[in-house]
């Protein structure tokens, strides 16, 4: 894991410094969130009327969690009460990083009713795939594969790469998630192929995909570092900090993540991302092995 306190070239160097006059993001409106069906809320795109959904992530590295920290997501609801949303922890004993994501604190049983999906990395920790709670296509009977019945779906991919600035610049991120229509329905290709979305991004094929990149920080001579404008939501420099944008709309940040204390972070996102997708993408930032910090 890349040290949090590296002060050269992370995603939010000089986080407290106002970098530029960015367009003010839409206010968070928790009244627009329907929390009556938590699974549906967590797996569906955030309502456009909700604006930027503001969450916090707490990392627990104490005791048995020292080698495999546990991450928990919280959000203040319309009454101002902080509500638990999601938790995750890396599975021990796997050759590659593998994070199970659950909607109940302490319950990371993949066969249980609270299991939502997982984030899986490649061997070197530069590529990540986000899946729902369906089964691996290899474990299904052949007659089910054509219909996609019971088979897991790719809900996103994250790719990290080093940058042209070497050790002084932030790492590059590419993210793709399935496109959604105006009603929030996911346009999900039914396919038994396990890594279709990953291959599509590598081939620059973004058909039915929403393609995001990290917003490049600008060099600030005054603080001697790369900086981004997090609108006060991020206060500590970290190589893990990032903002995701669509290339043709750089002022609209769809997901931002950053550090505010030793083991506390903020995660703010908006439509068309779901809480589950946003959390999985941020987990990849904790895990990524790209050492271009």
Image: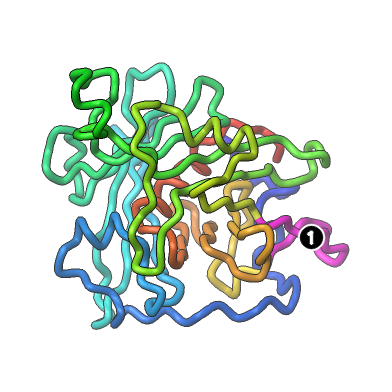
Residue 177, horizontal then vertical, whole percent: 47, 48
Hey, which quadrant is residue 237 in on the image?
bottom right
Quadrant of the drawing holding the C terminus: top right
Point out the stretch of residues depicted in magenta.
215-228
The answer to whether 137 is drawn above or below residue 22 in the figure is above
Looking at the picture, how far across and down is residue 66, in whole percent? 37, 34
Q: Secondary structure at mark 1?
A: strand
User: Neighbour class for label 1 at 10 Å: few (<14), some, many (≥20)?
Assistant: some
Q: Is residue 291 above or below residue 244?
A: above
Q: Is residue 20 left or right of residue 116?
A: right
Q: Position of residue 225 (x, y in %)?
A: 79, 56
The residue under the point 41% across, 46% down is 280
The residue lying toward the viewer, choosing from 257 and 149, is 149
Q: Is residue 9 visible?
A: yes
The residue positioned 41% from the left and 70% from the top of the image is 53
Would you place residue 278 above or below residue 70 in this image? below
At 26% from the left edge and 34% from the top edge, which residue is drawn?
Answer: 148
Name the image quarter holding residue 243.
bottom right
Task: State whether residue 157 is above or below residue 80.
Answer: above
> Residue, x 47% and y 82% (percent of image)?
27
> In this rendering, does residue 89 appear at all?
no
Is 266 placed left or right of 34 in the picture? Answer: right
**In which quadrant is the N terminus drawn?**
top right
Q: Which residue is mark 1?
A: 218
Query: Magenta includes 199?
Result: no
State the count of labels: 1
Q: Position of residue 136 (x, y in %)?
A: 28, 25
Front residue of 12 and 100: 100
Q: Nearer the viewer, residue 132 or 278?
A: 132
Q: Is residue 220 inside the magenta stretch?
A: yes
Q: Is residue 117 left or right of residue 264?
A: left
């Amino acid at each position: 894991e890349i040290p949090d306190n590296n002060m050269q070239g992370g995603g939010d160097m000089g986080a407290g410094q106002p970098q530029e006059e960015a367009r003010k993001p839409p206010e968070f409106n928790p009244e627009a969130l329907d929390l009556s069906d938590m699974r549906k809320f967590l797996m569906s795109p955030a309502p456009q009327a909700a604006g930027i959904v503001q969450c916090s992530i707490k990392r627990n590295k104490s005791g048995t969690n020292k080698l495999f920290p546990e991450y928990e997501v919280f959000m203040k609801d319309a009454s101002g009460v902080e509500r638990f949303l999601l938790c995750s922890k890396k599975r021990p004993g796997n050759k590659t990083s593998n994070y199970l994501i659950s909607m109940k604190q302490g319950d990371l049983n993949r066969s249980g009713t609270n299991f939502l999906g997982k984030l899986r990395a490649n061997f070197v920790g530069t590529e990540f795939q986000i899946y729902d709670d369906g089964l691996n296509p290899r474990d299904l009977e052949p007659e089910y594969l054509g219909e996609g019945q019971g088979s897991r779906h790719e809900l996103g991919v994250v790719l990290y790469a080093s940058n042209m600035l070497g050790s002084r610049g932030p790492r590059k991120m590419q993210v793709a998630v399935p496109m959604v229509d105006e009603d929030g329905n996911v346009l999900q290709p039914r396919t038994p192929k396990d890594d279709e979305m990953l291959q599509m991004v590598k081939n620059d094929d973004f058909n039915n995909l929403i393609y995001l990149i990290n917003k490049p920080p600008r060099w600030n001579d005054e603080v001697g570092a790369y900086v981004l404008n997090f609108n006060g939501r991020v206060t500590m420099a970290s190589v893990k900090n990032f903002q995701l944008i669509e290339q043709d709309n750089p002022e609209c940040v769809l997901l931002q993540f950053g550090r505010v204390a030793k083991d506390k972070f903020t995660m703010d996102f908006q439509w068309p991302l779901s809480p589950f997708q946003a959390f999985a993408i941020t987990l990849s930032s904790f895990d990524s092995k790209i050492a271009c910090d």
